[in-house]
């Protein structure tokens, strides 16, 4: 199994190299040259496997240059007691709905599913490729990737990590999780700008040849912890199989029966993992792509036009406040018959005029998707309604997926069993969630609301955020988007 760039010629590289590089030199993203198919009886076999076994099974198909021993080491080091439940990714039945809770890891968001394993994959890849330079992980975050990457890469020998987050675009709990993070190889910087600015700044550094040569002479090489790294994406395929096996176990579906998934979407990584699962032959009917008011993907699914020239909103689901969804590039590659010059053309248009339009033929490739969105009121109202009806408390991002799924059902009268992907703990967004339930919480700050949330839900405050407001803030650098590179140079002393 080899990987190539979505924008390049047919240079084929191994999984290890793709994981180490993060992004291709031509600015494209690495994609598997072929999506591996599931053998006819392996779906049945998977039904009895636990999370670690399924993760191993998936990664063995994609990361073929890793030995079994290496993959086992990665999987077992990642999915252990850091997760607060042995199931790792439990499926909860709530009324007639099924929520796949991906927030039981150390930082309370689904980013832990991949970022708890990426450091081990990267370390193994470094050994295999005999890398003698120090790796610098450059990361842009809309709130959750940052802390999950810090957690995963803290104190890992041979690696430094630098995180950029939008100064005004994260929740108070998210901010505090990052700015209080300890670890002798970690740097956290707020930027005056939004997530797209952060991601763009990081990509510019990755693609600057002269800067990278300078870096190498100083003994460093860049890599990425964002979902542009294929090492982030593939581990996420596993939980779709796992959700399926759990639905099967409780008798909700027969083996082979199709399901839908509804995914709260920002950078298009999570839902792309579901798409890859479907391409592998996994029985998925519809991929429901749920957006918030930054609904650029809804318009794209609807009209085939991607237009980033629009107002940017800071919403109550900040981890999805994104107008340039990086991983869509990988979908474009798939639905244009893998013509890299076509993908390259779209990306250049997006960069120069801010939009591109796909062909009618390519639009057919979107048939397995349904796009819609939830505005802020809908997001809030449904949190309250579901909580009052069932005592189940979802976070704002999960609510976006829930609202969008309900729109899908109304539009299509489709009763296929649907997994709603729950991407964050409500404890990360206490302000928005508690104020959704009642206006009696208005005068409290997000940290006081952590205790209030514990009281009403009876769910213990996760250790990850206990007393978080009392921890010392150790990262307080702020820079403009133009200063990102200088900040990196300064940190590395080069
Ligand atoms: C990152 C994130 C998303 C969006 O996921 P993508 O893979 O970027 O589409 C949704 N919800 C939460 C809570 C997140 O942290």
Image (tube, rainbow, N blue to C red):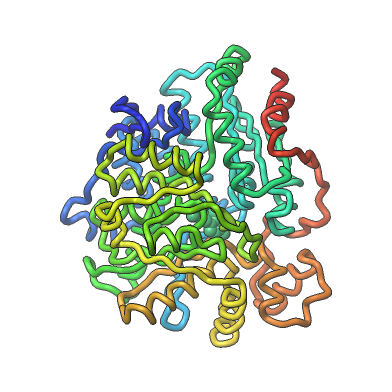
Q: Is residue 69 left or right of residue 380?
A: left
Identify which residue, 119 or 263, lies in the foreground. Answer: 263
Measured from the top left, where is residue 317 in percent x and y?
61, 63
Seen in the picture, residue 469 relative to 340 is either above or below; the reply is: below
Residue positioned most to the front: 353
At x 25% / y 40%, what residue is drawn? 34
- At a point 44% along the width and 41% down the height, the residue shown is 349
Front residue of this view, candidates 133 and 172: 172
Q: Quadrant of residue 420?
A: bottom left
Left or right relative to 216: residue 405: left
Q: If the image is split into quadrants, where does the N terminus sit?
A: top left
| Residue visible at 50% across and 46% down in the picture | 354
Q: Kindly tell me whether residue 368 is visible in this rendering.
A: yes
Spot the residue most to the bottom.
389
The spot of residue 374 in percent (x, y) is: 53, 71
The reply to whether residue 84 is visible in this rendering is: no
As rendered, which of 251 and 447 lies closer to the eye? Answer: 447
Task: Check the picture and name the quadrant holding the C terminus.
Answer: top right
Compared to 171, does 445 lie above or below? below
Q: How many marks?
A: 0
- Please state the horizontal and vertical placement of residue 232, each as a whole percent of the image: 46, 43
């Amino acid at each position: 199994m080899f990987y190539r760039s979505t924008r390049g010629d047919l240079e084929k590289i191994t999984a290890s190299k793709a994981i180490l590089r993060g992004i291709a030199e031509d600015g494209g993203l690495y994609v598997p040259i072929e999506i591996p198919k599931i053998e006819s009886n392996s779906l049945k076999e998977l039904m009895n496997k636990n999370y670690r076994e399924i993760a191993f099974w998936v990664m063995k198909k994609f990361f073929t240059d890793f030995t079994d021993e290496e993959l086992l080491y990665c999987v077992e080091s990642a999915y252990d007691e850091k997760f607060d439940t042995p199931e790792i990714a439990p499926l909860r039945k709530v009324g007639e709905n099924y929520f796949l809770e991906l927030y039981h890891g150390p930082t309370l968001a689904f980013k832990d599913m991949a970022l708890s394993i990426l450091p081990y994959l990267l370390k193994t890849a470094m050994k295999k490729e005999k890398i003698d330079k120090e790796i610098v992980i450059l990361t842009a975050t809309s709130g959750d990737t940052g802390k999950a990457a810090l957690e995963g890469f803290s104190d890992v020998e041979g690696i430094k990590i630098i995180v950029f987050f939008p100064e005004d675009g994260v929740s108070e709990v998210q901010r505090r999780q990052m700015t209080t993070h300890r670890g002798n190889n970690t740097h956290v910087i707020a930027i005056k700008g939004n997530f797209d600015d952060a991601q763009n700044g990081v990509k510019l550094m990755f693609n600057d040849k002269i800067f990278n040569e300078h870096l190498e002479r100083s003994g460093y090489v860049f890599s990425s912890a964002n979902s542009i790294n294929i090492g982030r994406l593939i581990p996420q395929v596993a939980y779709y199989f796992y959700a399926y096996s759990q639905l099967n176990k409780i008798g909700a579906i027969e083996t082979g029966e199709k399901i839908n998934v509804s995914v709260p979407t920002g950078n298009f990584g999570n839902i792309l993992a579901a798409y890859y699962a479907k391409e592998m032959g996994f029985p998925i009917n519809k991929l429901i792509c749920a957006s918030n008011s930054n609904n650029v993907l809804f318009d794209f699914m609807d009209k085939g036009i991607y237009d980033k020239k629009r107002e940017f909103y800071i919403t109550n689901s900040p981890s999805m406040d994104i107008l340039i969804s990086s991983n869509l590039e990988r979908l474009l590659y798939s639905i244009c018959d893998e013509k890299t010059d076509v993908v390259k053309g779209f990306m250049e248009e997006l960069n120069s005029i801010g939009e591109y339009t796909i062909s009618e033929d390519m639009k057919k490739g979107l048939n397995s998707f349904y796009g819609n969105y939830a505005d802020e009121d809908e997001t809030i109202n449904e949190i309250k309604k579901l909580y009052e009806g069932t005592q189940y408390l979802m976070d704002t991002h999960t609510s976006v997926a829930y609202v969008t799924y309900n729109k899908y059902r109304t539009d299509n009268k489709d009763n296929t069993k649907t997994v709603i992907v729950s991407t964050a703990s409500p404890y990360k967004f206490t302000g928005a969630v508690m104020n959704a339930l009642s206006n009696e919480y208005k005068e409290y700050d997000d940290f006081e609301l952590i205790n209030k949330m514990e009281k009403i839900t009876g769910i213990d405050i996760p250790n990850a955020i206990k007393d978080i407001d009392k921890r010392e803030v150790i990262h307080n650098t702020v820079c403009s988007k133009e200063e990102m590179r200088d900040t990196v140079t300064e940190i590395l002393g080069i």
